[in-house]
Amino acid sequence: MPKDTVMKRLFRMSVLLALPVFAVVSVYAQCVPDTVNCKDINEPGEICPAQLPDATVNVEYNEVITVIPPGEATLGTQTIYIEYIILDSVANLPGGITYQANAATMYADSLYCISISGTPVTAGEYPLSIYITPWIFAGGTTIPGIQVKNDTSVVMTVNEAAGVDPNRYNEFQVLPNIPNPFSEVTLIGFFTPYDDLIELEVYNILGELMHHENYGSPPGEHYFKFEGEDLLPGTYIYRVTNHKEVFTGKFIKARR
């Protein structure tokens, strides 16, 4: 999970009563809420991060949205107290991407998560819409309110794949990293025509090794997912090595 400190107000709710409850999610994810970066700041609910890490066409994607349901909302001058919310749906997902929540019923002021995963097939910018039904205290009982949508959307961006040169399918290829510049995560792609051990090294401009990993890879197109949120902004050199060749590239860590 990226350590994005951006948090969003989940609801500026205008609650209406006694409307039917919509279908709930019945399959639960094994995701874990981000308790470090997503905090209750006494607003009417929180959802974070606001900007999901970028995805790439035809590259597997798996990220987590953290939700803190609201405990109350304002209707005119009246305060409405909410016991829990029902997650109805997450809309406007990219093609090839699905979602699962770790619970359908989410109680006020507790932390929950929604897993966003799959392999996107179309590039673009997708503002996600999260629809919920609040259950509120009224007259000594709990009743459903109207379905509402988060007022500002979490955004998921899908980039075009760098692409493998079809005239070089018998050669090892390194693809430009996407995105570049990046703020938290960038993908460094490669194509190998055979089983091989691929090595990634990242250096700062002083030549100091900042990151190292190996990837035992079958034939095909693959990606290193480099999480550089802890790096200082600036220019870095990466080196990708197979059993006989070394390729170098450059990327920029941008300011948040």
Image: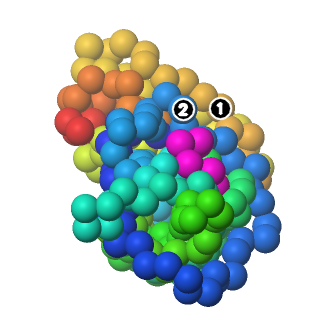
In the image: residue 190, left or right of residue 126: right
Q: In this rendering, does residue 169 appear at all? A: no
Q: Which residue is drawn at 26% across and 47% down?
A: 181
- Residue count near mark 2 (Cα–Cα under 10 Å), binned few <14, some 14–19, many ≥20: few
Specify which label sits upstream in the sequence, 2 or 1.
2
Local SS, label 2: loop
What residue did someone put label 2 on?
Answer: 35
Q: Which amino acid lies under the numbered mark 1 shown in the image of this protein?
A: Asn
In the image: residue 79, left or right of residue 106: left
What residue did someone put label 1 on?
Answer: 214
Asked whether disc 2 touches disc 1, contact meaning CB atoms under 8 Å apart, the reply is no
- Image position, residue 153 (x, y; %): 35, 66
Magenta stretch encompasses residue 163: no
- Residue count near mark 1 (Cα–Cα under 10 Å), binned few <14, some 14–19, many ≥20: some
What's the magenta region? 106-111
Viewer-proximal residue among 57 and 153: 153
Res. 105 image quadrant: bottom right
- Image position, residue 109 (x, y; %): 53, 42
Q: Which residue is drawn at 43% across and 78% down?
A: 16
